[in-house]
Image (spheres, helix red, strand yellow):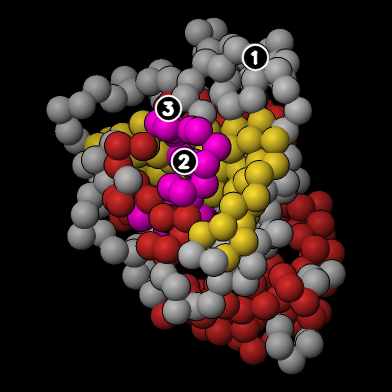
């Protein structure tokens, strides 16, 4: 059940979305800021994964607007932004996010990273810790497991060869667990929608995907030498076979003050499979509310501790 101390209705957006253009190290990038009349928590920054754009958060953005202003981004290499050559590491993407926040006037924020975006969010929290009140990582890992690397390399051979059907199937079998598709909320419908999206990739999107994936393969491991100091929640779907619960739990142990849980009836695409539930969970975390006794997930487990206050 929703926590009665967290508003869940009466959503009103104070002004229309503001789309801004930015330039970072000569690369064009864009952002989208949607404000709400009665924000309950600090602005939420959403950093997406492969093939996501600033407009593609859909219900996740809408659900968060009941609680906070929402900022989504096309960082260099995503959406309407320029292709970012692979020699530019994730540090450059983290600094681009910092620059974009400066330009729109957002100071301290809550950051949500999804899939590929978790590496950007984690690095942003390391490099700009004073800007991050709390961070949530959805579907993450410290390094690419062998089975995933094989599939990723195969997909990157198929894409430039124009074998789009095989490319789509290879990507989808990473993002959706074929063995549990019938157990996942909306799994078959979402998989088919994603398939159509992949088959219709524009040349610019294909070039972005290739460069971003090469970057991922070159920089295989997350730099965990500096622990993000703010409270961190790591979560994924219980059936995620790409960034598995064990891999996500490992990331949680690298943070100073962290929690881990899984969402039921979901896999790697949990933000879109169970949008209302994950927004409820993350809003509780951002508002320092209890993370136990929720019907849609396992009770959160404390992985790392600090003297800072944390959810009960």
The residue that label 3 is drawn on is 285
Residue occupying the point 24% across, 40% down? 229
Q: Quadrant of the C terminus?
A: top left
The image shows residue 213 at horizontal and vertical percentages of 55, 75
Kindly tell me whether residue 264 is visible in this rendering. no
Residue density around tag 3, few if under 14, some if 14–19, many if 20 or more, within 10 Å: many
The residue that label 1 is drawn on is 37
The residue that label 2 is drawn on is 102
- Measured Cα–Cα span from mark 3 to mark 2: 25 Å
Q: Which residues are magenta?
A: 97-123
Up the image or down, 5 lies above or below 16; here it is above
The quarter of the displayed image where residue 107 is located: top left
The image shows residue 217 at horizontal and vertical percentages of 45, 78
Foreground pick, 61 / 26: 26
- Measured Cα–Cα span from mark 3 to mark 1: 21 Å
State which tag comes first along the sequence, 1 or 2.
1
């Amino acid at each position: 059940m929703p926590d009665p101390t967290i508003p869940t209705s009466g959503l009103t957006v104070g002004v229309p979305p503001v789309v801004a253009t930015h330039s970072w190290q000569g690369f064009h990038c864009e952002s989208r800021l949607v404000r709400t009349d009665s924000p309950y928590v600090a602005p939420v920054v959403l950093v997406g994964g492969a093939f996501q754009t600033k407009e593609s958060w859909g219900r996740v953005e809408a659900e968060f607007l009941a609680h906070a202003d929402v900022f989504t981004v096309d960082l260099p290499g995503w959406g309407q932004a320029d292709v970012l050559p692979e020699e530019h590491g994730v540090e450059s993407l983290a600094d681009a996010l910092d620059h974009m926040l400066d330009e729109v006037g957002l100071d301290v924020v809550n950051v949500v990273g999804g899939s590929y975006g978790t590496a950007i969010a984690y690095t942003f929290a390391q490099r700009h810790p004073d800007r991050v009140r709390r961070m949530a990582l959805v579907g993450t890992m410290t390094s690419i497991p062998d089975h995933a690397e094989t599939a990723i390399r195969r997909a990157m051979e198929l894409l430039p060869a124009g074998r789009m059907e095989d490319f789509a199937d290879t990507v989808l079998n990473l993002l959706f667990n074929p063995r549990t598709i019938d157990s996942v909320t909306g799994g078959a419908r979402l998989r088919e929608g994603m398939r159509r999206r992949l088959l219709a990739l524009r040349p610019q999107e294909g070039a972005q995907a290739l460069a971003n994936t090469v970057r991922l393969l070159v920089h295989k491991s997350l730099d965990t030498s500096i622990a993000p100091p703010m409270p961190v929640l790591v979560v994924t779907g219980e059936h995620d076979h790409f960034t598995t619960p064990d891999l996500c739990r490992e990331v949680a142990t690298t943070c100073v003050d962290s929690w881990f849980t899984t969402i039921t009836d979901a896999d790697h695409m949990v933000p879109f499979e169970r949008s209302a539930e994950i927004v409820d969970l993350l809003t509780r975390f951002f508002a320092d509310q209890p993370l136990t006794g929720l019907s849609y997930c396992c009770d959160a487990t404390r992985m790392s501790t600090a003297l800072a206050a944390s959810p009960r």
